[in-house]
Amino acid sequence: MSSPPMIDGAFARWLASRAGQALLDLRTEMGFADAGALKSAGDKVSHDLIRTELAKWRPGDAVLSEEDEGSRLAWAAEVNTGALSRLNADRVWIVDPLDGTREFSEEGRSDWAVHVALWARNAPSPHGLIAGAVGLPAQDRVLGTDYPPAYPPMTVEAAAAGERKIRLAASRSRPPVFLTDLAEDVGAHLVPMGSAGAKIAAVVTGEVDAYIHAGGQYEWDSAAPIAVATATGLHASRIDGSALKYNEADPRLPDLLVCREDLATRLLAALQKHSG
């Protein structure tokens, strides 16, 4: 096998693509009869591939992965001992090897993703992300910061009506309880989708206008999609309007808003009213 691209954005795309193909192959090999086994195997296959390639091609970088043992809990003990190595690193890969395991295990679903992002200490942006790629293997595409998509067009409905009709991507299983009221307030309708990566990708491509989440997430759930979304020119923030930050001591990042820039003020005002 030839060497991967050396530029970080292209490398992230290459890595997300390789992991995505491995996941597609696994789906074909295992089938969908045992959803639990397929989920577990998918997490492991993608994680092991990404970890192996990062160790080979980026050995000096730190890694934060959902599937690393203790990722959700180890931070507390590490902070107490002052030994959290990724906080002292200049470059940290933040990865979710399989975002949307439920959708991955369901035949015919394509709303699952592979996330590969790179945080750097000297990054110019508040979120610190300098490269990222979101692989959507079942959709046969990878969105990346090396070739960010064009700013998303208006929805078909909005163009036809001559005005903007907001479509909000929402979790299939865990939408924020206030989201229905917020959607009614701003004249929007909810579009249920699977993984966080698939929902933010849908904003990037213009399939929906915004994604709001307030039900609890971790850095790996959004790092790569946020890197791509902001490279595209979209608004991305916490739901109170503050900056998203990555490679924090506590990897929990519970809420976010991703939307077209022209909708940000309106949606942030509605969030202030409905999310408190």
Image (tube, rainbow, N blue to C red):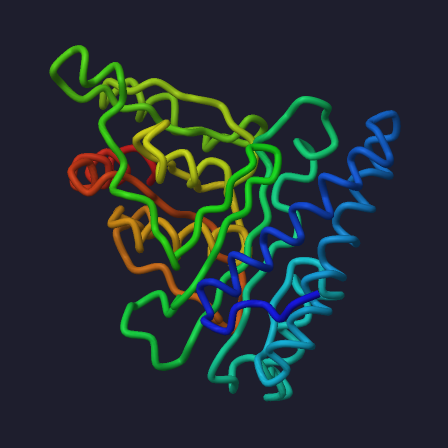
Q: Where is residue 264 in the image (x, y as percent from the top left)?
A: 21, 41
Q: Position of residue 76 (x, y in %)?
A: 62, 73
Image mark count: 0
Q: Is residue 161 left or right of residue 92?
A: left
Q: In which quarter of the image is residue 263?
A: top left
User: Which residue ends up furthest to the front in the rendered image?
Assistant: 2
- Image height check: is 107 above or below 198? above
Q: In this view, does 7 lie to the left or right of 275?
A: right
At x 34% / y 37%, what residue is drawn? 275
User: Which residue ends up furthest to the left in the rendered image?
Assistant: 162
Q: Looking at the rendering, in which quadrant would you find the N terminus? A: bottom right
Nearer-the-camera pick, 56 or 185: 56
- Image height check: is 4 above or below 26? below
Q: Where is residue 183 in the image (x, y as percent from the top left)?
A: 31, 22
Q: Is residue 31 left or right of residue 179?
A: right
User: Which residue ends up furthest to the top in the rendered image?
Assistant: 161
Q: Looking at the rendering, in which quadrant would you find the C terminus? A: top left
At x 73% / y 48%, what residue is drawn? 22
Nearer-the-camera pick, 276 or 146: 146
At x 60% / y 29%, what residue is drawn? 110
Q: Position of residue 117 (x, y in %)?
A: 49, 62
Nearer-the-camera pick, 157 or 73: 157
Q: Quadrant of residue 270?
A: top left
At x 13% / y 18%, what residue is drawn? 163
